[in-house]
Amino acid sequence: MMVDSLLQSGLAWFLLGAVLLIIELTMPGILAIFFAAGAWITAILLWTGMIGGTSVPIAVFLVVSVVSLIFLRKRLAAVVGRSIGSDQDSERALDDVIGKSAMVVESVDTSAHTGQVEFRGTNWSATAGERIEAGSVVEIVARHNLTLKVRPLGGSK
């Protein structure tokens, strides 16, 4: 009974759209915004009395979300300049980290296989050929998945 009243509540659909918008803003790619739009259109239709019941709002949400996703995703990506579905470009961009500087935020310990560096505002797992203390500036020499291999800046190759 509670689920039925939530499905018929324009406020619940509006809040779902807000949560999906927040998810969109925090995640890479363009996907959740279309489901947010579907939730908001469902909320508007419920508030205006154009739809009702429990299954109709779900159907409207799914149809609007999927149709907008299919027809607008690439256009929106071009407008906002985000790359979608391009793993090769993402890999190339990640490989551009080599030769850049990073800050050690957790000491890199070769024996314990621990350590983290901060690069462009994100913490990455790090490895090195020697122990490097937190606070040191390092150069990124390689990337293996989500782990950066680093060396002390100005050290020997």
Image (cartoon, rainbow, N blue to C red):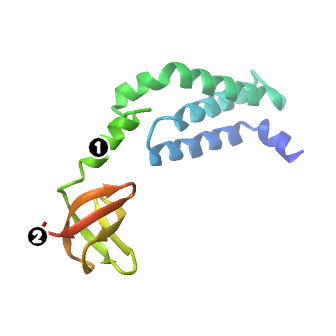
Quarter assignment of residue 56: top right
Q: Is residue 107 above or below residue 66?
A: below
- For mark 2, what is the residue? 156
**Measured from the top left, where is residue 147 in percent x and y?**
36, 61
- For mark 1, what is the residue? 93
Q: CA distance from mark 1 to mark 2?
A: 26 Å
**Measured from the top left, where is residue 14 in percent x and y?**
64, 39
**Measured from the top left, where is residue 38 in percent x and y?**
62, 29
**Measured from the top left, where is residue 116 in percent x and y?**
34, 70
Q: Residue at x 75, y 31 (%)?
A: 58
Q: Is residue 107 above or below residue 46?
A: below
- How many residues crowd mark 1 within 10 Å: few (<14), some (14–19), many (20+)? few
- How many residues crowd mark 2 within 10 Å: few (<14), some (14–19), many (20+)? few
Q: Earlier in the sequence, mark 1 or mark 2?
A: 1
Q: Residue at x 39, y 57 (%)?
A: 146
Task: Give the quarter of the figure containing the C terminus.
Answer: bottom left
SS at mark 2 in the image = loop
Q: Residue at x 27, y 79 (%)?
A: 134
